[in-house]
Each structure stands twice: as C-alpha cells, then as structure tokens.
C-alpha cells in the first residue's frame, strides 16, 4: 500500500537506525491518499537534520524534533483531506460461444490480438491455450478498461480517475502512471455443430514508480476481443 501522509506536505518519515539518514520524501502522487494543507510553521531544523547523517546519540533528539514539528503543524491548523477507500482488484473471467470450429477460431485469435496490440506470450495450439501480454497501457486506456481501485468512503463512486492519479503522480515526483494486462484464452469444442467455447481470463495492474496496484477489468477489452473475433470470422456481433 502507498505511504500514509504524516505531516502537512503529504510526506512521511522512515524509522531511524544507528548511523542512518533521516529522509523525508513526498507521497503527493499516491493513488488514493489524502494530503494535509500546510500551516505556517518553520521546518528548517528538520531539513537541516535531513541533509546529514544522524549519529547514534542523536537518534532520540531527531525523533523528538520530528514529533515536536509534527505537533506544531497539527496545532497550527492542518486540515486533513479525506482519502479514498481502497478496493482490492481481482482477475476477471469472460466467456462466450462462437459458431465456428476451434481450429478456425484459434487462427483468427492471433490476428485479432495483433489488432488490439497484444503480444503472444504462450501459444499451445493443441490444447487451445494462448496467453497475451500488453505492457504499455496509458492512464486514459486504464480509465477505459479498468475500474479505479479506490472509492469515496461509504459509496461505490470512484475516488478519482487514472488520468487524475497520473497528473498528481507527475507533480509529486512519482512518475507517470501506466498499466499492464495479461490475457489468457482457452478454446474448447462446444460439442455440437462445430461451435467453440472461449474463456478469457485477464489480470490488470496499474503502477507508478512508488506504487503497484492490481485493478479490476470493466470487461471492455474482453467484449472488444469477442466482437473483433466474430468480425474476423464473418459472424454477426453477439446481441447484448
């Protein structure tokens, strides 16, 4: 999980050990963490301490300074911004029947995958198993294909968008937000009239430099995959 902000710039501190540095770094780009608004309290003493190694005998003093500094911010009028409630992502299964022999469907799958910018990772024609990978999903694509992994507390309303997270992450030094998808397809004979049963299993991940979060598919790519496959085989789209 991303770091919890512990002072008024949305940053956190790490525990100190003998001879370690005191590091303060930003969490402003977190995907669902609120930040705190700054009160007019000086932090020069903490910044000076952060620039040099902390000697063992100064560990207690460093911690005391940090605690006093944090209390000063709290008493100076910091206001907490509500943070999003995380929703654990999960893989998605999508199944459909297609009126075509398995061998024809299998060959068409490769062309369809290429049109959707999916690269083949595993190919087992005899068993009817193919695994595809896509590792260059942009923030807008994540918004199109996936549900945002945090909601407003007590609701099902998304706390933000992947585009919004990307903007905050870039400003906060977390780098750009991107995603990956692993999509596996298993084709089996439907057992009647040469039809084929297709099962798609997808796993999605969104991340920046400091956070990685599994997210849940909206089913959009899976439906695009089915529609493109039917079109490739000259079949009518499945009725919604």
Image (cartoon, helix red, strand yellow):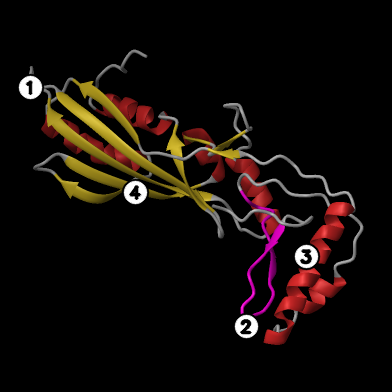
Q: Determine the CA span between mark 2 and mark 3.
A: 18 Å
Q: Reading the chain from its start, which is encountered first: label 3 or label 4?
A: 3
Mark 2 — residue?
18
Mark 1 — residue?
191
Q: Determine the CA span between mark 2 and mark 4.
A: 45 Å
Q: Residues within 10 Å of mark 1 (few under 14, many from 20)?
A: few
Q: Residue at x 83, y 53 (%)?
A: 74
Q: Residues within 10 Å of mark 4 (few under 14, many from 20)?
A: some
Q: Is residue 26 magenta?
A: yes
Q: Is residue 31 left or right of residue 70?
A: left
Asked if one can make out residue 55 in the rendered structure from this viewpoint, the answer is: no
- The mark lying in front, picked from 2 and 1, is 2
Residues rendered magenta in the picture: 11-30
Of 206 and 178, nearer the camera is 206
- Which mark is on residue 133? 4
Q: Are marks 2 and 4 in contact (CB under 8 Å)?
A: no
Q: Are marks 2 and 3 in contact (CB under 8 Å)?
A: no
Q: Are marks 3 and 4 in contact (CB under 8 Å)?
A: no
Q: Reading the chain from its start, which is encountered first: label 1 or label 4?
A: 4
Height in image: 23 above or below 102?
Answer: below
Q: Reading the chain from its start, which is encountered first: label 2 or label 1?
A: 2
Give the image quarter of residue 10: bottom right
Q: Residue at x 18, y 36 (%)?
A: 106
Asked if one can make out residue 240 in the rendered structure from this viewpoint, the answer is: yes
Name, please, the residue furthest toward the top: 239
């Amino acid at each position: 999980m991303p770091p919890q902000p512990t002072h008024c710039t949305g940053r956190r501190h790490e525990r100190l050990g003998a001879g370690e540095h005191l590091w303060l770094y930003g969490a402003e780009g977190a995907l669902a963490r609120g930040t705190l608004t700054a009160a007019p309290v000086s932090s020069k003493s903490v910044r000076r301490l952060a620039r040099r190694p902390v000697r063992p005998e100064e560990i207690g003093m460093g911690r005391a300074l940090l605690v006093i500094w944090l209390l000063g911010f709290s008493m100076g009028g910091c206001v907490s911004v509500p943070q999003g409630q995380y929703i654990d992502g999960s893989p998605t299964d999508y199944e459909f029947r297609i009126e075509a022999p398995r061998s024809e469907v299998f060959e068409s799958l490769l062309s369809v995958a290429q049109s959707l910018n999916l690269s083949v990772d595993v190919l087992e024609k005899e068993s009817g198993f193919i695994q595809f990978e896509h590792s260059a999903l942009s923030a807008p694509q994540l918004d199109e294909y996936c549900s945002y992994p945090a909601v407003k507390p007590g609701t099902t309303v998304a706390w933000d968008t992947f585009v919004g997270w990307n903007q905050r992450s870039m400003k906060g030094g977390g780098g750009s937000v991107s995603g990956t998808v692993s999509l596996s397809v298993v084709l089996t004979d439907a057992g009647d009239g040469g039809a084929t049963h297709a099962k798609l299993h997808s796993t999605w991940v969104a991340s920046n430099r400091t956070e990685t979060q599994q997210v849940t598919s909206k089913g959009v790519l899976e439906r695009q995959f089915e529609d493109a496959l039917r079109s490739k085989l000259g079949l009518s789209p499945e009725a919604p």
